[in-house]
Image: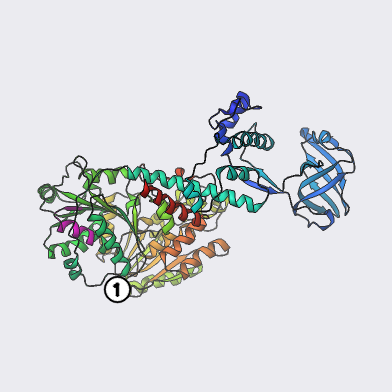
Amino acid sequence: MLLTYDTPIQYMTGVGETRAASLAKLGINTVGQLIHHYPRGYQFRGNIKPLASAQPGEVASFMLIAATEPMVSTLKRGMTVCKLRAFDESASCEITFFNQPFMKDVIRKGGEYRFWGKLTNEYGKLTLASPVVEPIVENKPLPNLVSVYPLTAGITQKLLSKLVMTALNALILRPDALVETLPEDVRKENDLCTLAYALSNIHFPPDFETLAIAKRRLIFEEFYNFILGAGKSNNNDTSTAPTLANTDITPLLDCFSFELTGAQKRAVCDIAADLSGTKPMRRLVSGDVGSGKTAVAAAAAFIAANNGCQCALMAPTEILATQHYSDLEPLFRQLGFECRLLTGSTKASERNKLLSGLADGSVQLVIGTHALISEEVKFSSLGLVICDEQHRFGVGQREALLAKAEKGNITCHQLTMSATPIPRTLAMFLYGNLDMSVLDELPPGRQKVKTFVVNEGYRERLNGFIRRQRDEGHQVYVVCPSVEEAESGEMSQEDIRLFDYGYDAEEIINSHMPPKAATTWVKVLEESLPDLRFGCVHGKMKASEKDSVMRKFAAGELDVLVSTTVIEVGVNVPNATLMIVENAERFGLSQLHQLRGRVGRGNAPSCCVLVSDTMQDSRAHKRLDVMRTTYDGFKIAEFDLGERGPGDFIPSGDGDVRQHGELKFRLANLCEDMELLEAAVKAAKKTLAES
């Protein structure tokens, strides 16, 4: 039968139902899926060496003549060993095959073969153990590169390679059977090979140069199709939003005690342009710690209020919502607009008054937590929704707030903010359905937080440093990687994250420096510094308990706050001047940068001390040294991305378009293929604009 892209795999010669079931475990159910089952690697068998010139332990190919017939011996427990001697013009060696008795029928004395494997030299005797064997046949050259495929039980490399060759030959020879999948203009503009060329040479490349050409085309296409799919979903949105034509923010700027940075001005211009149209704004503002996202959000909220629309700003925690309210309420009151706060702690009388104000339109700006999505919260004219730290909200929560503005085909504008610096190209990919503004400048005078990396030998000096901060009227954060101590030999949830950083389970469990737990470490510090006032917060506490402790710390009623990473984002206590991170090697660099950003927010010099006893580990040393020497969050994010992949930058909401499992590509790598990703983003956006 003629094979097509959609032909079930079981109908290929040599497959049948049993092998089809095995291939299905690899995700191969059709001929099309077979030719897109790419090799996981390649064996370079073109590096042919004479035996005498190869280095012990070197993997290479050797063109040898079998000097003896293979002899098979049976050892204990049924294990077999097949041995023979072979030679070339330079030397001879012993070749051994374990549990491959059939080799006695494959190799014949006097025959010439290419053996590919690792050559060892034991006591002056050259040996090849279980090499790959290929007979040398006249007028039938052997390939230099050999594909190695992901396999499953019942499927061998030889079988899979043969099936792929059969499928490619059947499809490529018939133009109607293998249709080009990239638009011709996109392919030519980006200097990409044809699909047929790419598939042929990803499976059977004659050399590395040709393989690179094939991979380039297929990686580009993976990125292009992914972005195109997300963009089409966004383009299909036919809803409209209120046109906020009056974008003059001069009255707001006159209230500021500072001038906007160039990056802030660009972001505000982007937002103003979006708001003045009828298409709903969907914009992400990504900025480093202290880059001024709140001022940008204030500008957006002011434009909405000045055009007769209401704005809702949703923050993930009560303390962050309260901070935004403290910053924005005086500004908007001065400008003649009503700004209110709605959280789980809002008193019933205040809540009822606020709900009435939102319903009749007398409250123009409401700042709150998830309480904003309560069914009883109704707006008169919601025109703009701002989500701070958007990755901490699920899609359902964001959509629930947006739905409060929907009336038929009319919705509202949306601005999302993230304090995690995301490499621009990666952000374009992760948030392809959002326009993006980057705050890559810090306001003048923003101080750098001096960063030090120390080990446990500095503990007494660290305790003295903590006391000195208190004596000078300042406060201290101490961050631990764990909430509670794990049982001996047990991995905590925090330990599991170390797999992302290149550590293995045995290394973690056997570490001589177990992860410090906030609930126990606070007691240790209280014993060492009994005259200081301590508080502790962690993710297992109730929200009301956490907020109570945080309020005390913000009010200066506590000297030291021991916590987990719950204080990572949004906490603003200008009087805090020292951040100590215990077991610093257990955190991602972007996370450490966020923690460091909790200090240095006032006028006093501030420090961040990273405590780690793994500095003898070169990987850990390199990572922490980046923190010691680098203060640019975007550069740190780039390094973090290259080291650990995009996990830290991917939202974890309830049903977001881009989740971890959906970022698995056959060939593309978000860390290594940035240049192609950028080209694919550009091409996809152009295609969408023209569609």
Tell me what residue is drawn at x 41 percent, y 61 percent: 524
Q: Is residue 319 visible?
A: no
Task: Name the element at disc 1.
Answer: loop
Asked where in the image residue 274 lies, by quadrant, the reply is bottom left
Tell me what residue is drawn at x 58 percent, y 37 percent: 35
Q: Which residue is mark 1?
A: 473
Image quadrant containing the C terminus: top left
Residue neighbourhood size for the residue with mark 1, other residues' Cα within 10 Å, grouped as few (<14), some (14–19), many (≥20): few
Reply above or below: 537 against 19.
below
Q: Nearer the viewer, residue 500 or 654?
A: 654
**Is residue 193 rendered to the left or right of residue 330?**
right
Give the percent coordinates (x, y) of residue 48: 78, 52
Query: Is-magenta flag for residue 305?
Result: yes
Give the percent coordinates (x, y) of residue 437: 33, 59
Tell me what residue is drawn at x 82 percent, y 42 percent: 138
Q: Nearer the viewer, residue 263 or 562?
A: 263
Q: Is residue 254 visible?
A: yes
Image quadrant containing the N terminus: top right
Give the percent coordinates (x, y) of residue 657: 38, 44
Kind of residue indicated by mark 1: Gly
Reply above or below: 335 against 230.
below
Task: Tell me where the magenta segment starts and ends, as one range.
Answer: 298-311
User: For the stretch drawn in magenta, what is the main secondary structure?
Assistant: helix
Query: Is-magenta flag for residue 511?
Result: no
